[in-house]
Amino acid sequence: MPWFEDFAVGDRIAFGRYAVTRDEVVTFAGAYDPQPFHLDDAAAAKTHFKRLAASGWHSCAMTMAMVVAAQQARDAGEPDGGGALGAVGIDALRWLKPVYPGDVLRCETEVLEIKPSRSQPHMGSVKSRLTVFNQDDEPVMTQEPIVLYRRRPQGGTG
Amino acid sequence: MPWFEDFAVGDRIAFGRYAVTRDEVVTFAGAYDPQPFHLDDAAAAKTHFKRLAASGWHSCAMTMAMVVAAQQARDAGEPDGGGALGAVGIDALRWLKPVYPGDVLRCETEVLEIKPSRSQPHMGSVKSRLTVFNQDDEPVMTQEPIVLYRRRPQGGTG
């Protein structure tokens, strides 16, 4: 798992593949965002969505699934040590285009800012821009997650 | 459904009640955020969460469920007309405290900013601060949703 010191501004990675299904869109919306345009074709046709579209929060959840899968693939077999201490939050989340059943999503991230904690010397925060694209390479969502990481211990031998 | 003109800076509303269950926490995390501290008591005990905690995205989804339920209750029986045209996005989302199975969540919102659209005269945006509290009245999450609303048509007779 990476340490705070493993990040540099401008670092970019691309990862993830998520096929959006109609069943999942309707199930998520039924539980958490039961607005007609997330549940019903005829209702969606009358809106700017034009057809059944995923809840924006479902897009966030599917994105998190891609993030966690990429982290777990990267960390597999790595010695334990660094690692994320938790997410502070998200800035500037924007839903740019509807996400539809049949879409296939993927992610790109770029590190925007790295900041050692002043009050907690064992950690630092990393702010990135995460962009989610659909199969036509259109950005459908952007967000700027802020995540805390452990700092690499400074040994006496340098 | 409200028009853009129905909002004023400083307007506050309180709404919602959501009982967080262990089954739901684990089901959501299994699908979208399968990190050990969202799935397993023993793994969570070793982290700053101390015990099994909900995914931050699950907290967002439960919050949206409260928002939609409140909107639908308010709009029931109202003549159609105004209404939200969609969410632009969310600023300043912060996960302040863990959300645990057994917690009961509720919401408060305050309107921060109302802005007529310059390019699209039939709409305007409303930015609010939404705070989610647990049963001990501790804020567990804040976010600033930006939502587009239709403007009330200006009739010739005023």
Image (cartoon, coloured by chain):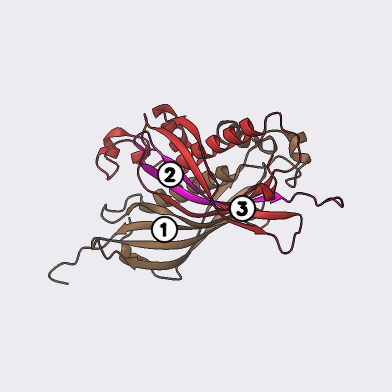
Chain colours: A red, B brown
Q: CA distance from mark 1 to mark 2?
A: 13 Å
Q: Is residue A4 left or right of residue B124?
A: right
Of all residues shown, which one is farthest toward the front? A157
**Label 3: few (<14), some (14–19) or many (≥20) C-alpha neighbours in 10 Å:** many
Residue A128 screen position, x and y as percent: 54, 51
**Residue B153, located in which quarter of the rendered image?**
bottom left
| B11 and A20: which is toward the camera | A20
* Circle 2 Cα neighbour tier, 10 Å, few/some/many (<14 / 14–19 / ≥20): many
Are the residues flagged by discs 3 and 1 from a single subunit? Answer: no
User: In the image, are marks 1 and 2 on the same chain?
Assistant: no
Residue ID for mark 3: A126
Q: Which residue is mark 1?
A: B146
> Callout 2: residue from which chain?
A
Graded by Cα atoms within 10 Å as few (under 14), some (14 to 19) or many (20 or more), the crowding at tag 1 reads many
Image point 55% across, 44% down: which residue? B57
Q: Examine the structure image and report whether residue A150 is included in the region drawn in magenta.
A: yes
The amino acid on which the numbered mark 3 sits, given as a three-letter code, is Val
Magenta residues span A128-155
**Which chain does the residue under circle 3 lie in?**
A
Amino acid type at circle 2 is Gly
Residue holding disc 2: A56
